[in-house]
Image (cartoon, rainbow, N blue to C red):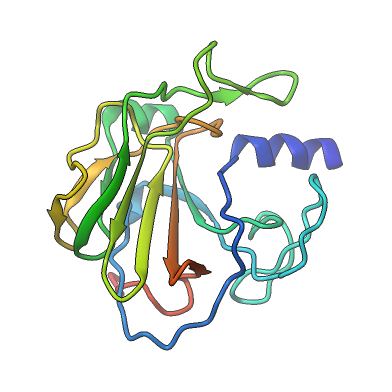
Amino acid sequence: MRVFFAVVLLALACEPIDHPVTDTDAAISLEWPVPLDEIGSIICVDHDPVDYAWPDYDCVDYLGRYGFPYCYDQHMGTDFILADEWTAMDRGVPVFAALGGTVIGTVDGNYDRCRIALDLTINCDGHELANNNIYIDHGDGLVTGYLHLKARSLLVSDGDEVEADEQIAEVGSSGLSARPHLHFEATQDGLVIDPYEGWWVDKK
């Protein structure tokens, strides 16, 4: 059973931030960074402050649900995993800015077809294990990050001003990733926040 979970976790691998989850009273609504009809599953932020040794899967999500597949230990972002995986990635799935702000960091050009190998490592076909990403400063200490982006899909550069719901890139599988997905993270004054605690714009 643990081998199964190890395979699944690596297949959904994201790069966590080493910060505790914090509560915030900010009245902010974030746009969904990926089209809802492209999402196959979602892995949430871990609200359990205890750091268990990997591969321990102890975690608690925003609804108090325990363990995988709701979250995994020390996962400090939200994974939006594409339903059609590689087919969708090749077709092109847009990534949108969750809120208006200023682009403060971008990385592009890294290999974007990383995947799980038989030995449970991430295989980037000999390329560097580095992801393509965008970071946006929204003011008042709020920063959002968009990781594992498709190579050469970035539509913004450092210093650009973006609006909420503006396309900034496409979903990929670059870096520590074994299937196409977006790792979305948000920090308030350097501490991780969980946008699932009432932050999303209701698009039902």
Q: Residue at x 56, y 25 (%)?
A: 115
Q: Is residue 67 above or below residue 146?
A: below
Report which quarter residue 69 is drawn in.
bottom right
Report which quarter residue 149 is drawn in.
top left
Residue 60 percent coordinates (x, y): 69, 69
Q: Residue furthest top?
A: 126
- Left or right: residue 127 compared with residue 20: left
Report which quarter residue 203 is drawn in.
bottom left
Decide which of 78, 191 is in the foreground and name it: 191
Q: Where, quadrant-wise, is the C terminus in this rendering?
A: bottom left
Residue 56 percent coordinates (x, y): 81, 51
Q: Is residue 63 above or below residue 180?
A: below
Q: Where, quadrant-wise, is the N terminus in this rendering?
A: top right
Q: Is residue 85 above or below residue 160?
A: above
Q: Residue at x 19, y 41 (%)?
A: 157
Q: Residue at x 49, y 71 (%)?
A: 193
Residue 11 percent coordinates (x, y): 61, 35
Q: Residue at x 58, y 71 (%)?
A: 21
Residue 188 percent coordinates (x, y): 43, 72
